[in-house]
Amino acid sequence: RNFVDLPPRYAEWASAAGISRPPERLDDPAGFVGGAKEASFQLKEKKMHISIISPENGLRLIRDPETPADMSTLALRAVVNPIVPQLVWYIDGRPFQVTDYPYTARLTITPGEHMIQARLPNSPVSSGSVKIIVQ
C-alpha cells in the first residue's frame, strides 16, 4: 500500500481528503513504541514542537447577538512536530478537549478575554499561549 508523508501543516486537509498517514513503526521518527492498535505510546527523547495556527494571537471577535450562542464557534487548529496521536486543548488554564490527529476542535465563544494553549497529554510539552478577546 502507498502512503503520502506530508508535512504537519497539511494534516487537516489530508485527513479531510481521506489520505492515510503512514503507519507507526518501531523506528518511527516520532518515537512511538508498539503497534497501531495499542492505545498507549511512549516518546523517545525528541524535541517536540507545538504551534497553534488558528486562532492568531490577539484576535478580536465581535459576537453577533442574533446568532444562537451554540452556533458562535471558533476553529482551533494546531501543528505538532513530530506527529503524536493526541493533543489536549486548554482554555483559560482548564482542559477543554482532547483531540486526535489532526488536532482540530471548535470552541463556543463567550464574551471576555481567553487564553488558549495546546499540550501533549500527560506531558509538560505545550504551545505558547494565544490570547483572544470576544466582545
Image (cartoon, grey):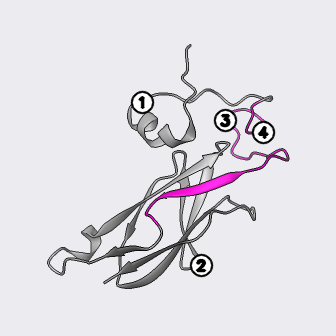
The residue under the point 51% across, 42% down is 9
The residue that disc 4 covers is: 31
Give the CA distance from mark 4 to mark 1: 24 Å
| Nearer to me, 133 or 31 | 133
The reply to whether dot 2 and dot 3 touch (C-beta < 8 Å) is no
- The amino acid type of the residue labelled 2 equals Gly
Which secondary structure, mark 2? loop
Q: Earlier in the sequence, mark 2 or mark 1?
A: 1
**Within the image, what quadrant is residue 92 found in?**
bottom right
The residue that disc 3 covers is: 37
Give the CA distance from mark 4 to mark 3: 16 Å
Q: Name above or below for residue 86 compared with residue 135.
A: above
Give the CA distance from mark 2 to mark 4: 28 Å
The residue that disc 1 covers is: 18
Which secondary structure, mark 3? loop
Q: What is the span of residues highlighted in magenta in the rendered image?
A: 28-56
The residue under the point 68% across, 59% down is 121
- Most common SS among magenta residues: loop
The reply to whether dot 2 and dot 1 touch (C-beta < 8 Å) is no
In the image, taking residue 95 as reference, residue 16 lies left or right, namely left
The reply to whether dot 1 and dot 3 touch (C-beta < 8 Å) is no
**Circle nearer the viewer, 2 or 3:** 2
The residue that disc 2 covers is: 93
- The amino acid type of the residue labelled 4 equals Gly
The reply to whether dot 2 and dot 4 touch (C-beta < 8 Å) is no
Give the CA distance from mark 2 to mark 1: 33 Å
Q: Earlier in the sequence, mark 2 or mark 3?
A: 3
In the image, taking residue 37 as reference, residue 89 lies left or right, namely left
Question: Dividing the image into 4 quarters, which one contains the C terminus?
Answer: bottom left
